[in-house]
Image (cartoon, grey):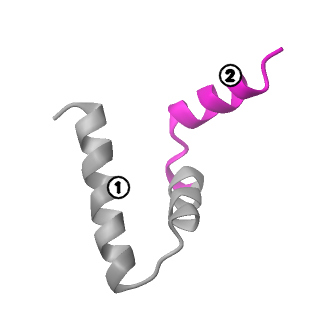
Amino acid sequence: MKKNSKTLAVLILLAVVDTIIPLPITALVLFYVMAARPSWFREEVDRIYQR
C-alpha cells in the first residue's frame, strides 16, 4: 500500500470514528508525534521555518 493510500485510509477511519465518538483529531496527531517522533515531522518544521 502506498503512503498516500495509507494516509487516506487512516483519515477515513478517523472520520468514521469521529462521527460515532467525537475525538479531537489534532490531539491524536499530537500524541502520535510526541510518542513516535517521526522524522517527517521534524523535516516539515525545518522546511516551514527555513529562510
Q: Quadrant of residue 46?
A: top right
User: Looking at the image, do the residues carrying marks 1 and 2 touch, with CB atoms under 8 Å apart?
Assistant: no
Q: How many marks?
A: 2
Q: CA distance from mark 1 to mark 2?
A: 24 Å
> Counting residues from the N terminus, which is met first, the one under dot 1 or under dot 2?
1
Label drawn at residue 47? 2
Dot 2 surroundings within 10 Å: few (below 14), some, or many (20 or more)?
Answer: few
Q: Quadrant of residue 3?
A: top left
> Percent from the top left, x then y, of residue 26?
57, 62
Along the horizontal axis of the image, is 37 left or right of 10? right
Q: Can you say whether 43 is above or below 18 in the image?
A: above
Magenta stretch in the rendered image: 35-51
Q: Which mark is residue 25?
A: none
Query: Relative to 9, does residue 45 appear above or below in the rendering?
Result: above
Q: Residue furthest top?
A: 51
Name the residue located 38 percent from the left edge and 85 percent from the top edge: 21
| Residue kind at label 2, given as amino acid type | Arg
Q: Amino acid at mark 1?
A: Leu
The 10 Å Cα crowd at callout 1, few under 14, some 14 to 19, many 20 or more, is few
From the image, state whether disc 1 or disc 2 is nearer to you: 1
Image point (24%, 51%), residue name: 9
Q: Assess whether residue 8 is covered by the magenta stretch.
A: no
Residue ID at (58%, 37%): 41
> Which disc number belongs to residue 11?
1
**In what element is the residue under mark 1?**
helix
Q: Position of residue 39 (x, y in %)?
A: 53, 32
Residue 34 point in image, percent of width and height: 60, 54
Main SS category, magenta section: helix
